[in-house]
Image (spheres, rainbow, N blue to C red):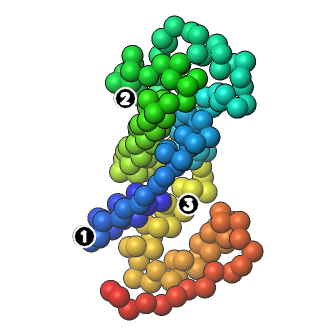
Amino acid sequence: MLIQLQKSLEDIGSNIVVTTDSSSPDRAVVFGTYYTRFSIKKATFESINFPSEKHQPDIIEWFRETPNQDWPRMTAFDDVLKGLVSWKDVADWNTQCTMGMRLHNFYVFKDAIRNVTELIYGHDYILKQAVDSEVYKVLRSIDDMVKSEDPSRVFESYKQLYMKMSNTKKTPTNLTHDFF
């Protein structure tokens, strides 16, 4: 949605730059989460969990004793980690392991952002097939609102969709501002 907002603002000649921040790739490591891929259609990350001494002591022993094997390769960046981080590092849950997981997860996140950006800036025919139909409608509504002479009217026409997508029971209210 933020990438669509950026594209729509560019389409009208705005110099506004849309940015965001996420701790998800880093925070996931605390739970042993190793991202494997991103589903554009479902808008979710898929993952596997690395074992922990506390919860899987029998599995950890195998990881600790297994000769240096590389982690599953999911991104081009994983080639950089090859040989630098081992299953023993996972068993020991050391800094090498947690930093490697953080960087790996960041690159899965980065790849997802790149893929979504290519879809948003690509042909609408492909985007419509790649994302969920309701997400597609939300993306179109963002574009319609940014380019409209009457964004409030556009918002009202999509209000039921927004309520459904946000799973809220409250009716949203429009706020008027004068900062443009």
In this view, the mark in front (3 or 1): 1
Determine the residue positioned at 55% across, 33% down: 34
The reply to whether the C-beta atoms of the residues labelled 3 and 1 are less than 8 Å apart is no
Q: Which mark is residue 137?
A: 3
In the rendered image, residue 104, in percent from the top left (x then y), is placed at: 44, 34
- Disc 1 is placed on an element classified as loop
**Amino acid beneath label 1:** Asn
The amino acid on which the numbered mark 2 sits, given as a three-letter code, is Phe
Pointer 2 residue: 77
Q: Kindly identify which numbered label has been placed on residue 15.
A: 1
Q: For the point 38% across and 48% down, which residue is it?
A: 117
Q: Residue furthest top?
A: 67
Q: Are marks 2 and 1 in contact (CB under 8 Å)?
A: no
Residue drawn at the location 33% of the way across and 68% of the way down = 9
Label 2 or label 1, whichever comes before in sequence order: 1
- For the residue pair 139 and 45, the one nearer the viewer reads as 45
Quarter of the view holding residue 12: bottom left
Is residue 119 something one can see in this rendering?
no
Earlier-in-chain disc, 3 versus 1: 1
* Residue at figure coordinates x 30%, y 65% from the top left: 17
Q: Amino acid at mark 3?
A: Lys
- Residue 143 vertical position relative to residue 42 in the rendered view, above or below: below
Give how far across and how far down residue 16 sits, in percent: 29, 70
Relative to 26, residue 81 above or below: above
Foreground mark, 2 or 1? 2
Query: What is the C-alpha distance between the residues marked 3 and 1?
Result: 25 Å
| In the foreground, 88 or 22 | 88
Residue 58: quarter of image: top right
Q: Nearer the viewer, residue 29 or 9?
A: 29
Q: Nearer the viewer, mark 3 or mark 2?
A: 2
Which is more toward the observer, 102 or 146?
102
